[in-house]
Amino acid sequence: MPVRAIRAVAALALIPVLFVAGCAPGSARANASAAVRLPACDGSRPARPDLVQVVCASDAIMARRLAWSAWGKPVATAVGEAVVDLCAFEDCHTGSYSAVPIVLVASKLVTCPKGVRAYTRLQYVFVGTSPFQGLPANMNYSNFMFGSARAGMPRDQTVQFAC
């Protein structure tokens, strides 16, 4: 048998092996991790979101440019940048925005209806000093303009999401 023919047969024999390797548990884990979601304030459930509104009751903290690690594991972390509205809990009327480094920790992985797996707890930490330093947690702030109360900062820098 010529060398070319032997190589062709060997190459054809490798195709099923490569196919099986692509379906191996490592590949299944990658698909499973992609199926894990993080519920968002708008009701969507993105996987590995690049943008997260951290506090649903306000636009105080918007995390963006997120790079996730260990997505799909019991605890996933992301580093990125938070755009914070420094006037979200005061009556500045115009808003005062600042960008600061942030770390997010997604945990409490549960199975939601229809078998969707999702993180339901999100903790955040500002790298360095919090831009909201000095504000009490879980306090409602009055909105003098509209006569309603606004939620304060979450206790322990932790927010819970429902499935």
Image (cartoon, grey):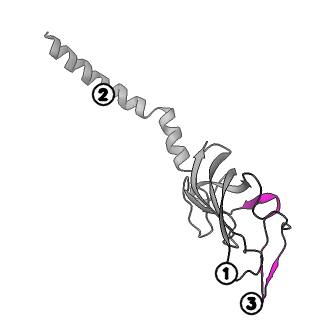
**Residue 45 position in % (x across, y down):** 57, 61
> In the image, is residue 155 part of the stretch drawn in magenta?
yes
Snapshot quadrant of residue 102: bottom right
Considering every residue shown, the one lying at the far top of the view is: 1
> In the image, is residue 25 part of the stretch drawn in magenta?
no
- Please tell me which of labels 3 and 2 falls first in the chain: 2
> Where 3 sits versus 141, above or below?
above
Q: Nearer the viewer, residue 65 or 32?
A: 65
Q: Nearer the viewer, residue 73 or 117?
A: 73
- Which numbered circle lies on residue 94? 1
* Tag 3 secondary structure: loop
**Residue 132 position in % (x across, y down):** 78, 65
> Mark 3 is on which residue type?
Met
- Which numbered circle lies on residue 145? 3
> Mark 1 is on which residue type?
Thr
Q: Is residue 109 visible?
A: no
Give the Cα distance between marks 1 and 2: 63 Å
> Mark 2 is on which residue type?
Ile
Q: Residues within 10 Å of mark 3 (few under 14, many from 20)?
A: few
Q: Nearer the viewer, residue 129 or 112?
A: 129
Quadrant showing the N terminus:
top left
**Residue 22 position in % (x across, y down):** 41, 33
Which residue is the site of mark 2?
15
Range covered by the magenta-colored residues: 139-163
Residue at x 20% of width, y 20% of height: 8
Residue at x 61% of width, y 64% of height: 40
- Of discs 3 and 2, which sits in the foreground? 3
- Please tell me which of labels 1 and 2 falls first in the chain: 2
**Residue 158 position in % (x across, y down):** 76, 58
